[in-house]
Amino acid sequence: MTRYGFVIDIGRCNGCDVCVIACKDQFIGNAYSPYNVAQPDLGHLWMDVKTYERGTFPEVKASYIPLPCMHCADAPCQKSATSGAIYRRADGIVLINPNLAIGQSQLVSSCPYGKIYWNATAYIPQKCTFCAHRIDKGLQPICAMSCPTRAIAFGDLDDPKSDVAMAVVAGAQPLHPEYGIKPNVYYENLPKTFISGFVIDPKTKELIIGATVTLNTPAGVELTAVTDGLGVFTFDGLKARQMYNLSITKQGYFNKVISVYLDKDKDLGGIQLISKVI
C-alpha cells in the first residue's frame, strides 16, 4: 500500500530557500479544491528552512533543516479536529478540509512541530498539503522538484525499492522521534555534536600542521583526523553525554592524551604539543 513521504538530506541543504519560494509561488493566491484555499501573502511558511547553529566562537557550524508538515500517522492535529476537519488519505497524506475547518483555531497549537497556520481572512487553519493536487497528476511536490541540490527526496515509503524507503532502512530518522506521532518525513545527516580544537607548539608559537588526532568512542570505534593548514581538527556526528579519549601525535613531539566529556558541542581551543627538541 502506498505511503508517501519525504527523506531530506541535511548534508545537501545549503539554505538557499528555493523550496520556500517555490511553495509560496505555488500556493499564494492559488486554491486547489478540495485541498486548500489560497495561502495568504504573509505569515505562512508551509515549507520553512530553519538554521541550526552549533558551537561557540570561533568554531561555529550551521546546518539548514527544511521543515514541512510531517504528515504524521498518529497526528495530534487530527485528534484535535472536530467534524472530521482533518483527514488522512489512503496514501498517508494528512489534509485539512477547508470547509469543515472554519473557525477551528485550536488546530494551530495542536501541532508540536508548529506547522499549522491561521488564515485570518478565510478564518481557517492551513498547512502543507504535500502538493496533493500535483501528486494526483503524477507529479512531485513542488519543493522536491525545485530543490537545486536534490536535498528533498519524495516517494513511497512502503515500496522497498524506492529511494526514500532505502534511505530509511539505511538510517534516515524523523525529527523529534520522542513525540511518538510517526511522522512521514525523515532526515539524513541530522546535526549531532562535535569536538574541535587546534594544535600548537608552545615554544615557537607555531600551529602544528599534519598532526594525527585519534578519537576513541565509548563504543570502541576509532576515528582519525589530521590537523589542517591552520592546525585545526574536528570530529563531527558524535553522540552527546559520553566520554571520549583523544590522542595527538606528531613526529618530533611528545604524545598528548586528553579525555573529554561531551555534554554539548565543544571547542577545546589550543592544545599544546611539546617538542622533543630542547
Image (tube, rainbow, N blue to C red):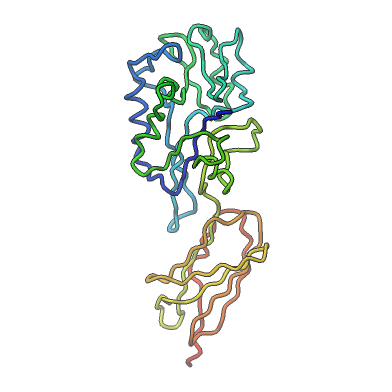
Of residue 72 and residue 141, the one placed in the foreground of this image is 141
Where 195 falls versus 105 (above or below)? below
Where 36 falls versus 145 (above or below)? above
- Report the residue at 47% width, 16% height from top: 118
In the picture provided, is 9 more to the left or to the right than 92?
left
Instruction: Answer with the quarter of the image where residue 181 lies.
Output: top right
- Number of disc labels: 0
- Report the residue at 60% width, 38% height from top: 176
Query: Dividing the image into 4 quarters, which one contains the N terminus?
Result: top right
Q: Position of residue 94 (x, y in %)?
A: 54, 22
Where 70 falls versus 11 (above or below)? above
Furthest toward the bottom, the residue is 278
Q: Position of residue 29 (x, y in %)?
A: 32, 16
Q: Position of residue 31 (x, y in %)?
A: 37, 13
- Report the residue at 57% width, 78% height from top: 256
Where 128 falls versus 224 (above or below)? above
Q: Position of residue 237 (x, y in %)?
A: 54, 55
- Report the residue at 46% width, 35% height from top: 154
